[in-house]
Amino acid sequence: MTRSDVEQIKFLDLIMIAIGCMIFAFSLVLFNIKNKLADGGISGITLILKAVFKLNPAYTTLLLNGPLILIGYHYLGKKALIYTIYGTLMLSVWLWVWQQVKLSIDYNHDLLLAAISAGLTGGLGQGIVYRFGGTTGGTDIIAKMIHHFKGIPIGHTLFGLDLIILTFSLVYIDSRHMAYTLIYSFTLSKVVNLITEGPYEASGSFIISNQNSKIVNLVMKKMNRGSTIFEAEGGYSHKSSRVLFVVVSARELNELKKIVLSLDPAAFIVSFHVNEVVGEGFTYKRPNFLSRIKTGKKSPNFFLNKKTKSN
């Protein structure tokens, strides 16, 4: 391993991955196992082995992940390999620890509360692990290998593997518990996305209109949002046109549409979800429009190159 590889490994990452594994293991032991809720991935297989053969998940997690890590290390990269081994070890350690702790959370047989609690805590744990570049091994490795050889998207493979594992989980849980497992899985996925992508939702919009200049000014005046105008060419008419690009928060999208349509009812608007926005007005406070006018400063939301024109 080179010096640069070592430098890429951050102490904070290792601490947060350990914390994430601690929370995820807590969820598996106190909610999934106690309430007979299944799971996908390697964790789901360990729960099956515990229910059928009474094997400790702390040990089966290592046994199942070990060969996968050895087989798939070529496709992980050195840093990802180290983080995967570390995450797998931390998960196994915490699974063992939580099974030794005499702690019980009694929901009085309310599986809905158990499923939601499992999704919230398990999603928080997994989200922290993913947020800081870690994984807990398992089907992630298989999905990356299949993507490498067959070109199948990783998400599709993970979904297929989870579906197979959940189906096999019916050997120890009934259809009622499986229904609550699906609620757990849905909640977990939403929390993981929230942790990894961040809580701030944004929307991007491409606007084609012959009133772009007025739209830019009104959006800045009423919404205090910057914008960019791209020079474009119509694919059918081959006529030059200008496309306005604006990024706003999700709750501001309707206001943006109203402004555009008030100036040009025939405007063409394409809006889409933006996973992450870094910059003024999103990850740090944006200055007031009037104060920017007084100081003569331009917003970093305005991009300028040979093919764009800012206003």
Image (cartoon, rainbow, N blue to C red):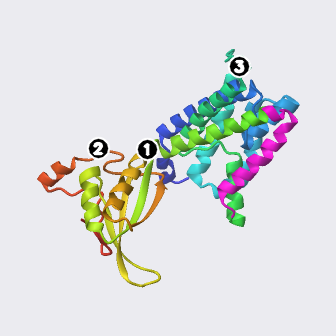
Visible in this render: residue 132? no
The quarter of the picture where the C terminus appears is bottom left
Q: Which residue is mark 1?
A: 200
Read off the magenta span.
152-176
* Type of amino acid under label 3: Gln
User: Local crowd at mark 1 within 10 Å, few (<14), some, or many (≥20)?
Assistant: some
Q: Which mark is residue 100?
A: 3
Instruction: Name above or below for residue 95 compared with residue 80.
Output: above
* Camera-side mark, 3 or 1: 1
Picture quadrant where residue 305 is located? bottom left
Measuring from the top left, give residue 273's x and y in whole percent: 48, 54
- Spatial CA span between label 2 and label 1: 13 Å
Q: Residue at x 26, y 51 (%)?
A: 222
Left or right relative to 181: residue 8:
left
Q: Which mark is residue 285?
A: 2
Is disc 2 placed on a helix, strand or loop?
A: loop
